[in-house]
Amino acid sequence: MSAERVANIDRLRIVAAMGIVWFHMEGVPHREIGYAGLPVFLLIFFSLITSRGRSDGTSHFLKRRWDRLMVPWLFWSVVYGLCKLGKAVCVLDMNSVRSMLSMESLLAGTHIHLWYLPYAFIAGLLIRAVNGWTSGVSNTAAVHMATILGVLMLVGHAMGMLGNDLMTPLPQWGYGLAAIPLGFAIGRCRMVSSRETQRLLLLMVALTVLAMCTILNSVGYTSLAIPYGLATSLVCMAYVWPSRSDAFVAYVAPLTFGIYLLHPLVMYGLRHSIVTSQHPAAFMIMLSVCISGLAAFGLMKTPLRRFV
């Protein structure tokens, strides 16, 4: 990927991290817009895995993804578990202790937002395998087929066909399923040799998903349609139109993973230290993002940097 396109994707990561904090902030309006940050993260991650092909060996790929996703998941599951345990002891809430020993915690972690990490790890392995199996299929054909599959998954999720009523985190995994073929489609777009054809295919993916999300939104599936419509359009546009990097992007983009991991702790601390209702929502979102980013930056200067 060119430096210009890296800058665009990094900017989008920053916006996505802010969106996730926005979604998790209690009482703020239009949270479904902020939740677009989740499919943005997934689409970027899956498209990069796809576009890089199988240039590295399977063992190297597994090690990199394990170190980047599963090791932080294990670490932060312990951190959030200890926090929950401490709170449970203070208020004598044994249900919280039992919940940490449930199948839900085994699949998602001890805090619900951690579900993203094992899901991304497993889905990344699947995408790598599918990319190898379809190496003989033209990129254009692969893009069209994957886009259709992604749209069908959006419809399936809206109709309750992808495990919406199952135990946590299976509904969250179901929500992220459409990002797998759509991320794959975007990644295969980038593997086309012609820059002009790349742009046309990316625009096709964005418009197709946006059209379906508009239909879903019109019939009441706002919580699904708005995040995916926004996310797919933004990711495709980030690849279509390059822009230059700057010092802010270079410093802040590496902190986005840490912001995602740390922000629930920061938000909990803010709720118990200041009266959040007395401050504008935008201020609380930015304050949470800044504190989480500073905490991530500090951890990156210590031996704990591998966990952020």
Image (cartoon, helix red, strand yellow):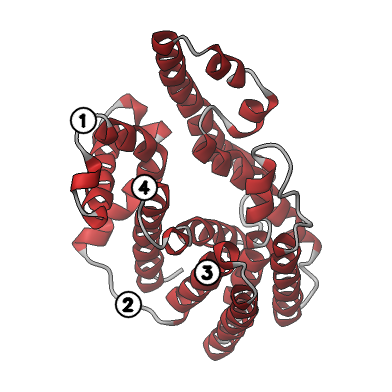
Is 194 placed left or right of 134 in the picture? left
Report, in whole angstroms, how far the alpha carbon at label 1 lies from the one at label 3.
33 Å
The label on residue 273 is 1
Q: Position of residue 169 (x, y in %)?
A: 64, 39
Characterize the local packing of mark 2: few (<14), some (14-19) or many (20 or more) Cα atoms within 10 angstroms.
some
Is 281 above or below relative to 220? Answer: above
Q: Residue at x 49, y 71 (%)?
A: 230
Name the quadrant of the C terminus: top left
Q: Is residue 300 visible?
A: no
User: Front-most of 60 and 122?
Assistant: 122
Name the residue carrying label 4.
25
Residue 245: which quarter of the image? bottom left
In three-dimensional space, the C-alpha distance between marks 4 and 2, rounded to whole angstroms, equals: 31 Å
Which of the marked residues, 4 or 2, is nearer the chain's N terminus?
Answer: 4
Q: Position of residue 112 (x, y in %)?
A: 53, 36
User: Mark 2 highlights which residue?
Assistant: 243
